[in-house]
Structures are given as C-alpha cells and as structure tokens.
Image (spheres, rainbow, N blue to C red):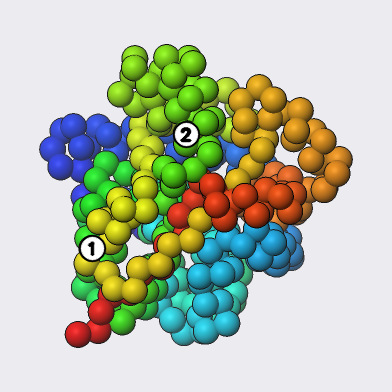
Amino acid sequence: MTTISGNGDGTEGAAAKRGIQAFWGALYDSLYDDVDSSLTRERLIEGIDALEDMFRLRRHMAAIEMPLNSLKDKRVLEVGCSAGGHSALFARYGAHVTAVDLTSSRVRATAAKFALLGADANDCRALQADVEALPFADASFDIVYSNGVLHHTNDTEKALDEVFRVLKPGGRAVIMLYCKSSWHYWVNLWLCIGVFKGRAFADENWLGKATEWGGKDTQKIANPITRCYTAGDIRRLFWRFHDVTLRKGEFYLYLIPKLGRFYRRWQIKRYGTHPGGYLAYGAPWPVQSPLELRLGRLIGFAWFIQATKSDQ
Ligand SMILES: C[S@@+](CC[C@H](N)C(=O)[O-])C[C@H]1O[C@@H](n2cnc3c(N)ncnc32)[C@H](O)[C@@H]1O
C-alpha cells in the first residue's frame, strides 16, 4: 500500500482531503463492517453475482457502459473503489484491476476482496491514492471507472486531467457524476432542504451536508464536498475527451423528504429487496418500481458518462 502522494495543494487542500477521509471512513465503516467481517470466498462470489444482477436490473453503468464481456486482460483503474464490490466484479471478468481510494479502510476492504478471490483476481491491487495526483505513469490503463467519486473531491477538473493522463490513447473513461437537471437536486435538495429549511442561504456546503447520509450510526462528521452538474457542465469538464455520451438514471421516490419513508415501506412489501445491495451498500437494496426506472431516464440523479481518449 502506498501513502498518499498528492494530499491537496497547500494547507487548505490537505485539510479538505483529511475531511474527506474522515467523513467517508466513518460512514462506510459503519455501513460495511458487518458484511465485510463475515465475508468468505463463497459469500463474496455469491455477492458479486447478485451485484451484477442488481446492476443489470437498475441499468447501472457497471453493467451497461462497462464492457464486462471484453474486460479479460484489460487494465482497469477504479477511482474511489470504497468497499471494492465494483472492482471485484471487474476482476471476476478477468480484468487486471487497480483500485484506489483516498480512505485507507476502504483500500483494506477492497484488498481483502481481491485476496478472497485469489487466482480470480489475477494481477489486481488496491492502493491508497488521491485521484488528483495518481501515482501511475501516463497511458497506463485501458479503462478508468469511477462511480460517484469525482464530485466529492476538491478539484474535479484536476481529477479529470489525471483520468485523461493515465488512460492509454483509445482508452475509455466510464464515470458517474451527480446530475443537477434532476428531480432529486431541484425538489428534494434545493427546494425542500435548501429553500424550505433555509440551508442554501446559510451554508456554502449545504449540498455536501444534505447528501450521503445513511450509515447505521448517527454521523457526527459532515460530508465536505458534493457537486451536481448539468449536461453543459459535463461537456465542459470532459473537453479533452472524444465521443462523450451521457445517459441519465437513478430515480427513487423514497428520497422525497418525510413522505419517502412511507413509500419505502410499501415499495419493500410490493417489490421486495435484492441481495445485490449487500456488497454495494452493506444491506439489501429495495427494488425500484418500473415507474421509477422510467423516470430515472428523464429526471434521474446520475449522469452515466462514457468518454474516449483520442488515439491521435
Ligand atoms: C460515494 S463514495 C463512492 C464509492 C464507490 N465508488 C461506490 O460506488 O460504492 C466516494 C468514495 O470516493 C473516495 N474519494 C473521495 N475523494 C477521493 C480522492 N480525491 N481520491 C480518491 N478517492 C476519493 C472516498 O474515500 C469514498 O470511498
């Protein structure tokens, strides 16, 4: 395991990175510890199969934009691997995965999954590293994959410069970033929390504080950074890349403040839960209704982005 080389620019940057590590460390240890501490090779393999099935059901980029059937012997970098479920799935398809995260406990959790997979995680490694200063040579990877990470780091532009640099010419970035042109941003977050609770006018980091809650323990540390993007913002961020395609997904009625919890109870009774959630969230995932899946394409909170580094 390496130590973090680029821990932010100057004191403020370094303090922000420590805040990111403290927040994600506490949240994810509380979410994943139960599942991770009882994981065996058999349970992990069952969990990976369930994870893939859940991704297909949700039309998540891990099973749609990621070319799972042609990952064999591809060099894949996952940025912000967290629990390591996505990386373990790519490893099972024969990719040589390098998984990085800023938070050391997340790196250990991912490394443990590679160790349980043994020969099925051929040439896979987990390292502690900062996406804004990746410790890899130029043109090292065929694919860089990152799910919901780059909008939580200090400098998203710098992170994308790094993603571009470490991709081989002709290589592909598969990245999820939060979508501003979405119901969740405008109604649940901006209107209900930002305006009705007055947070948007009182706190510069109101969006960070309004997102990413959900651990089993009460969170004492606030999420330091969350950003959301319009389609135009994404095109500007990915200016160096070619063939940039955007697809929207992920709409959940249970996220509607106050009323959502009643819907969630009904949803679980009506549609049940899916075991794919164990590796992704430390708990079974409440299955989305067909209506939510359809609405996700129009007003979902995720941009699933694919972009290519030109081979010229
Ligand atoms: C929302 S979680 C995403 C986790 C995972 N990709 C998933 O889909 O479950 C964000 C993760 O990104 C990591 N992270 C945040 N900033 C980072 C940075 N600058 N470099 C590397 N990892 C970072 C955090 O430690 C955390 O594990």
- Is residue 158 shown to the viewer in this render? yes
Disc 1 packing (10 Å; few <14; some 14–19; many ≥20): few
**Residue found 44% across the figure and 44% down from its top:** 181
Observer-nearest residue: 79 or 118? 79
Which amino acid type corresponds to the residue marked 1 in the rendered image?
Answer: Trp
- Is residue 113 shown to the viewer in this render? no
Residue furthest right as drawn: 269
Residue furthest left as drawn: 10
Observer-nearest residue: 281 or 176? 176
Rendered position, 207 above or below 230: above
Query: Relative to residue 129, is residue 211 drawn left or right?
Result: right
* Helix, strand or loop for disc 1: loop
Asked where in the image residue 40 lies, by quadrant, the reply is bottom right
**Rendering coords of residue 25 (x, y %):** 46, 38
**Rendering coords of residue 290 (x, y %):** 73, 53
The C terminus, quarter of image:
bottom left
Label whose residue precedes the other's in the sequence (2 or 1): 2
Report which residue position mark 1 lands on: 239
**Rendering coords of residue 253 (x, y %):** 66, 38
* Helix, strand or loop for disc 2: helix
Query: Relative to residue 271, is residue 211 drawn left or right?
Result: left
Q: Which mark is residue 267?
A: none
**Residue found 25% across the figure and 84% down from its top:** 311
Observer-side mark, 2 or 1, equals 2
Observer-nearest residue: 150 or 217? 150
Which amino acid type corresponds to the residue marked 2 in the rendered image?
Answer: Trp
**Residue found 22% across the figure and 67% down from its top:** 240
**Rendering coords of residue 176 (x, y %):** 44, 56
| Residue at mark 1: C-beta within 8 A of ligand 1 | no
The N terminus, quarter of image:
bottom left
Report which residue position mark 2 lands on: 186
Observer-nearest residue: 145 or 180? 180
